[in-house]
Amino acid sequence: MSKLPNCPKCNSEYTYEDGTLLICPECAYEWTAGSESESDELVVKDSNGNVLQDGDSVTVIKDLKVKGASSAIKKGTKVKNIRLVDGDHNIDCKIDGFGAMSLKSEFVKKA
């Protein structure tokens, strides 16, 4: 029997194969064999599928309501110097008139 690698996320030894995927039952992480040696670089894509990077400028593609604010971020608002983060809202930025914000990449396009 071949020895399966430990989970790259939680280092659990209880990994198992499911077709071409390796799965960790403790943290539910899935990966393909050989991919654990690749870097865990964050890949964020805009609404058109373009890869975003730190420092890019993006444009908002629809009006976005802001919780606790009296107005919305309007469609076409340009946001400069974005920073990519891990999570549901994967873009941190500063928007004039609103201040520091977190945006979802699905609501922006690369400028």
Image (tube, grey):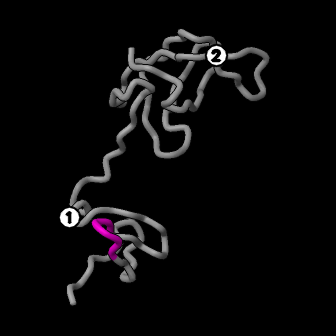
Q: Main secondary structure of the magenta part?
A: strand
In percent of width and height, residue 32 lies at: 28, 62
Label 1: element kind = loop
From this view, report whether residue 42 is shown above or below residue 59.
Answer: below
Residue where numbered disc 1 is placed: 34
Please state which of residues 20 and 7 is positioned toward the viewer in this rendering.
20
The magenta stretch spans residue 81: no
The stretch in magenta equals: 17-21
The residue positioned 64% from the left and 13% from the top of the image is 97
**Quarter of the C terminus within the rendering:** top left
The disc, 1 or 2, on the residue closer to the chain's N-terminal end is: 1
Separation of marks 1 and 2 at Cα, in angstroms: 42 Å
- The tag on residue 91 is none
Q: Residues within 10 Å of mark 2 (few under 14, many from 20)?
A: some
Residue bearing the label numbered 2 = 63
User: Of 18 and 12, which appears nearest the observer?
Assistant: 18
Disc 2, SS: loop
Query: With 32 as the anchor, is 47 left or right in this view?
Result: right
Q: Residue at x 48, y 15 (%)?
A: 59
Location of residue 20 with respect to 78 vertically, above or below? below
Using the rendered view, name the quadrant where residue 49 is placed. top left
Q: Horizontally, is 66 left or right of 79 in the view?
A: right
Residue 62, how many percent across, how many down? 59, 17
